[in-house]
Amino acid sequence: MIPVLDPYDVISITGHDLATPLTTITGALQYLESQIQSDNVPDTKWISILKHESKKMVMLIHQMQSFSALERRTIRYTFASLNVEDFIMHIIDILKRTYPNYTFMFNRITKYQPILVIADQDKLMQAILFIINALIFTKPINTSVMIRLRKRLSRIILRITLDHASPITKPT
């Protein structure tokens, strides 16, 4: 059974989740400002950090908007036949553009035969991206994301795993 969250809990959780990237962005901006004022050239990694954290905030805001639409029951569904493998490849393309510092891989564990489902492609994409974004949200840059697809009898199993790559260091 899926627990039902009170709207106030969702707002509280999301507010807390928004505070983390906002604090990081504020600190990075203060650092950049101090570097510019002292005529130092700031390290470009701070720009990457700002972009990454602002994407997190945008994702959280979209999640709040989706929750709001769900509460108002204004969501409409459009069902159609969907090739799951093509669909996952499309999601990986989106993720690669959104998170260029992460590695995304796809592994199909079943014999080749198109896996077709009837689904609302947009809602399914939102759900899968929500899950992957939430996982990435907690991981540092250079994390590998593996998406495995398996069909077992009448079930389709999508397993998403993350692995943070340790930086490679030169022997001394």
Image: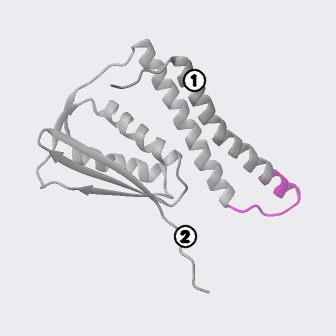
Rendered image: mark on residue 167 = 2
Residue 7 on image: x %, y %: 52, 18
Q: Quadrant of residue 11?
A: top right
Q: Is residue 35 magenta?
A: yes
Determine the residue located farthest toward the front in the rendered image.
1
Give the colour scheme of this rendering: one colour
Q: Is residue 123 left or right of residue 157?
A: right
Q: Is residue 60 left or right of residue 79?
A: right
Task: Give the quarter of the figure containing the C terminus.
Answer: bottom right
Residue 93 on image: x %, y %: 37, 51
- Residue occupying image coordinates x 47% and y 23%: 67
Mark 2: few/some/many CA within 10 Å (<14, 14-19, 20+): few
Under circle 2, the secondary element is loop
Whether 140 is drawn above or below 62: the answer is below
Q: Is residue 100 left or right of residue 118?
A: right
Residue 22 on image: x %, y %: 68, 39
Q: How many marks?
A: 2
- Residue occupying image coordinates x 12% and y 55%: 111
Using the image as rendered, state which of residue 59 and residue 39 is in the foreground.
59
Rendered image: mark on residue 83 = none
Rendered image: mark on residue 11 = 1
Residue 12 on image: x %, y %: 60, 25
Using the image as rendered, state which of residue 133 and residue 74 is in the foreground.
133
Three-letter code, disc 2: Pro
Mark 1: few/some/many CA within 10 Å (<14, 14-19, 20+): few
Mark sitting earlier along the chain (2/1): 1
Q: Which residues are magenta?
A: 32-44
